[in-house]
Amino acid sequence: EVQLVESGGGLVQAGGSLRLSCATSEFTFKDSAIGWFRQVPGKEREGVACISSLDGSSIIANSVNGRFTISSDNAKKTVYLQMNSLKPEDTAVYYCAAGDSKVVFYNKCRGGMEYWGKGTLVTVSS
């Protein structure tokens, strides 16, 4: 069974932090890359960070590098996105997604996802 359930979004002031969680299932997590994407209305969806369940390797987008980190708890089948030093331009709906690890990493966390969560809204006020 496919499961991708995001949580942790909310309203935060600029400079603050949030941690997003993506709870997955064994089926979804195994041999997959789990990633975080974000989208603002009227703009293309952007890959933020991806992590492989195979070896823990990760990709972080340049736009958030140094501020965001992605991690996973394999036992809990949960992936986290720690977001620090948030900026108003980080405001978006954040989606958790899963896909074949090799495909996702070949696409450098810009595509290759097969399954998507419903998203969680992050709003950063100035």
Image (cartoon, grey):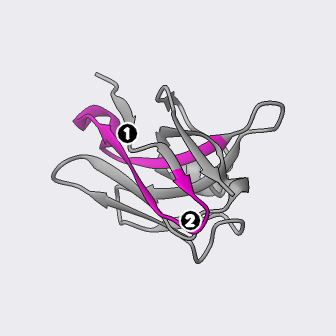
Q: Give the range drawn in magenta.
A: 12-38
Amino acid on which the number 2 mark rests in the picture: Ile
The crowding category of the residue bearing disc 2, from other C-alpha atoms within 10 Å (few below 14, some 14 to 19, many at least 20), is many
Does the CB distance between marks 1 and 2 fall below 8 Å?
A: no
Residue furthest bottom as drawn? 66
Residue 13 drawn at (x, y percent): 57, 58
Pick the front one: 63 or 121:
121
The crowding category of the residue bearing disc 1, from other C-alpha atoms within 10 Å (few below 14, some 14 to 19, many at least 20), is some
Residue 39 position by quadrant: top right
Residue 10 counted in the magenta span: no
- 80 on left or right of 111: left
Q: Nearer the viewer, mark 1 or mark 2?
A: 1
Residue 14 drawn at (x, y percent): 61, 62
Pick the front one: 9 or 53:
9
Relative to 23, does residue 55 appear above or below in the rendering?
below
Pick the front one: 68 or 72:
68
Pick the front one: 112 or 21:
21
Badge 1 element:
strand
Residue 31 drawn at (x, y percent): 35, 47
What residue would you read off at disc 1? 7
Amino acid on which the number 1 mark rests in the picture: Ser
Quadrant in the picture for the N terminus: top left
Badge 2 element:
strand
Relative to 76, does residue 14 appear above or below in the rendering?
below
Q: Residue at x 37, y 55 (%)?
A: 80
Residue furthest left as drawn? 75
Residue 36 counted in the magenta span: yes
Disc ID at residue 59? 2
Q: Earlier in the sequence, mark 1 or mark 2?
A: 1
